[in-house]
Amino acid sequence: MKKRQVSLKDIANEVGVSIATVSYVLSDRKDSRVSEAMAKKIKEVAKTLNYQPNKIAQSLKSGKTNTIGLIVADISNPFFANIARIIEDEATKLNYTVIFGSSDEKAEKSLHLIDFLSSRQVDGFIIVPSEGTDNQIIQLKQQNIPLVLIDRYFPNISTNHVIIDNFEASGKIVNELIASGYKRIGMIAYSNPLFHMRERIRGYQETIQNHFGNNISPNLVEIDFNDSRKQVCTAIDGLLAGENPIDAIFFATNTLAILGLKYIDELSLRVPDDIAIVSFDEGEAFDFYYCPLTHIRQPLDEIGKKAVQVLTQQITQPDMGEKQICLKADLIKGKSSIRR
């Protein structure tokens, strides 16, 4: 048999005061209507009886549920798992609960998550948008639902966002390869129109062009996210073929780098003796690789904390102007890009 939930009336009867007085104290009103001693006694009795406030009633009264909807692209990717944890921790400090889901880079699943979370009346969204979700973002804006995009955004849609300068970071890591003496640098990236990926590709292409002009052309291979394992192998085979095989590979994401490193080991190639490897983003698997990888490290703590701060400010101050925050990423030098 289900145990009856303790009510304000139960506490009032135990203490010997009115229900209104109990409600007044437990809602943390700050004026001097109730003495400190009485307020302390009411709270002690509430704790002893294991009183749990009615969250539904509270949200109906305030119009807020103190929940945030978080949608990431792929929760199995350590990058998104880590940023979800940072967002959850930061939201907890501000008395918000985070409900999250993974879109798996699919627009239809993203829409399902938005509908589900909206039905739970979340106060706002933090979203890593997937390809084809621009109309979903527009609809949220039209409904005046607070939202912040992270990691990626749509340049043609004005929204709050917290991102990094992907173009600058991509150029930085390619410059590191060139400074180490590498010239025939290939890049493997995902084939999609999302702005962050196009900026990483642009940073690679323009850095090659600026250093070598028409003497050496960029060697870019774009692959499908849904067939990445097979296509990474094919891409590496292609980059290594011919009279002038590449001497370095730049992987546009950590997941691509992990797939690539596995295949490079199958080919019995040594890093960096036979080929240099660099990656955008880090991965926990990199720690177990025999050669420390040169990579771009994104400021996850700052991204997560600023996203929560911007969203909660917009929830409490709906007229607050939009904030577009672009952060710098760090180049972490490993042995994988050292010329032997």
Image: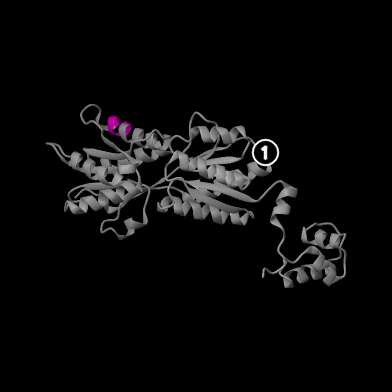
Where does residue 257 sit, x and y in percent of width and height? Answer: 30, 48
User: Residue at the spot x=52%, y=51% of the render?
Assistant: 100
Residue 275 visible from this viewpoint:
yes
Where does residue 172 sit, x and y in percent of width and height? Answer: 35, 40
The rendered magenta stretch, by its main secondary structure, is classed as: helix
Would residue 269 appear left or right of 97 to someone viewing this image? Answer: left
| Amino acid at pointer 1 | Pro
Against 14, residue 24 (above or below) is: above
| Disc 1: which residue | 318
Helix, strand or loop at label 1? It is: loop
Would residue 95 appear left or right of 51 to someone viewing this image? Answer: left
Where does residue 78 sit, x and y in percent of width and height? Answer: 41, 53
Residue 327 visible from this viewpoint:
no
Quadrant of the image containing the N terminus = bottom right
Against 149, residue 1 (above or below) is: below
Q: Quadrant of residue 289?
A: bottom left
Residue extending furthest toward the left: 243
Is residue 33 or residue 77 the one in the foreground? 77
Please say whether residue 65 is one of the residues in the magenta stretch. no
Is residue 136 or residue 84 the one in the foreground? 136
Would residue 310 appear left or right of 248 to someone viewing this image? Answer: right
Looking at the rendered structure, the number of numbered marks drawn on it comes to 1
User: Residue at the spot x=23%, y=47% of the render?
Assistant: 276
Residue extending furthest toward the front: 1
User: Residue at the spot x=39%, y=33% of the render?
Assistant: 193
Would residue 306 appear left or right of 44 to someone viewing this image? Answer: left
Q: Residues within 10 Å of mark 1 (few under 14, many from 20)?
A: some
User: Residue at the spot x=82%, y=59% of the render?
Assistant: 24
Which region is colored magenta? 206-210
Where does residue 155 sit, x and y in percent of width and height? Answer: 48, 31
How has the structure been colored for display? one colour
